[in-house]
Amino acid sequence: MPPRPVRPARAAQTVALAALLLAAGTACGSGDQQPPTARVAPQSPAGDRIGTLSIRTAQGPRACTASVVQSPRRNLLVTAAHCVQSRRIGLLDGLVFTPGYRNGYSPYGSWPVQSITVDPRWSAGNDPEYDVAFVTVRPVAGREVEDAVGGNPLGTDQGFDQPVSVTGYPNERDEPITCSVRTRAQSRTQERFDCSGYSDGTSGSPWVTPAGAVIGVIGGYQEGGESPGTSYSITFDGRVAELYRRATS
């Protein structure tokens, strides 16, 4: 585990990655009502846009979850910034993205990470208000990742109280989990949802609306949370729109 005494980490926890991936657990929801529990995600073409970030191969140490978003070059992922960079270690090298990974099977292969775009305020101080990253991947056999699996549009300025499905890869499982929930305000610039099961490895999991737009990723406040019952994201607003513009320009 990373050397944080109170909370478990949400990203991968190998000896090589522990110093970097101080990722998020999820914090307990308030009130007496128990949150729902995530279930195994059924396989679907839309679900195959989500995959694992791991080191060198699909079976290598896992870092986090990421997903394909629509972009002009058709090669862009979104995840949490703490999954790919920390102030102490810098950018994490050797990452590959494996969309649709399930039970040891990689239906589309693995796509090597080419470049990572994070906000300078994350780079300078790991500011949780900027815990999101856009990641470009190299083509495989001349094909871009969005051509292989499609991509979700990026949604910004959607407000709170939005229905979303959140799909991600806990490190202890070999298939993704999912939960359908509503977003809630954590602060003016951070939001949350309550559903149990989002443990190590689920940082970066996309928050997808019924229309297919990604309006959040697990991260932000407490790097995603302190226990598996509640997860956080920065609000996808002008900060994220500007970062997307930088990543695609």
Image (cartoon, rainbow, N blue to C red):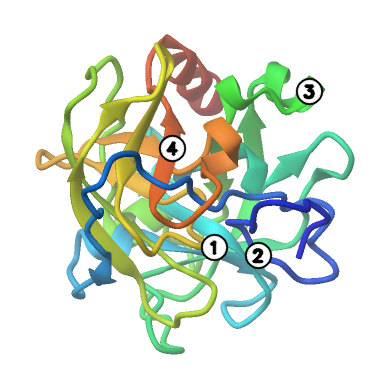
Q: Residue at x 58, y 23 (%)?
A: 130
Q: Position of residue 63 (x, y in %)?
A: 63, 61
Where 191 sits versus 44, above or below?
Answer: above
Q: Residues within 10 Å of mark 1 (few under 14, many from 20)?
A: many
* Image marks 2 and 1: residues in contact by CB distance under 8 Å: yes
Q: CA distance from mark 1 to mark 4?
A: 14 Å
Q: Is residue 118 left or right of residue 153?
A: right
Foreground tag (2 vs 4):
4
Q: CA distance from mark 3 to mark 4?
A: 19 Å
Q: Is residue 115 left or right of residue 68?
A: right
Q: CA distance from mark 2 to mark 1?
A: 5 Å
Secondary structure category for the residue under label 4? strand
Secondary structure category for the residue under label 2? loop
Residue annotated with mark 4? 232
Q: Earlier in the sequence, mark 3 or mark 2?
A: 2
Q: Is residue 144 left or right of residue 36?
A: right
Marking on residue 201: 1
Residue annotated with mark 3? 125
Q: Residue at x 59, y 40 (%)?
A: 223
Front-most of 24 and 55? 24
Where 168 sits versus 232, above or below?
Answer: below
Front-most of 207 and 244? 207
User: What kind of residue is marked 1?
Assistant: Gly
Q: Earlier in the sequence, mark 2 or mark 1?
A: 2
Q: Is residue 46 left or right of residue 109?
A: left
Q: Earlier in the sequence, mark 1 or mark 4?
A: 1
Residue annotated with mark 2? 12
Q: Visible in this render: residue 220?
A: yes
Q: Residues within 10 Å of mark 4 (few under 14, many from 20)?
A: many
User: What kind of residue is marked 4?
Assistant: Tyr
Foreground tag (3 vs 4):
4
Where 126 sits versus 137, above or below?
Answer: above
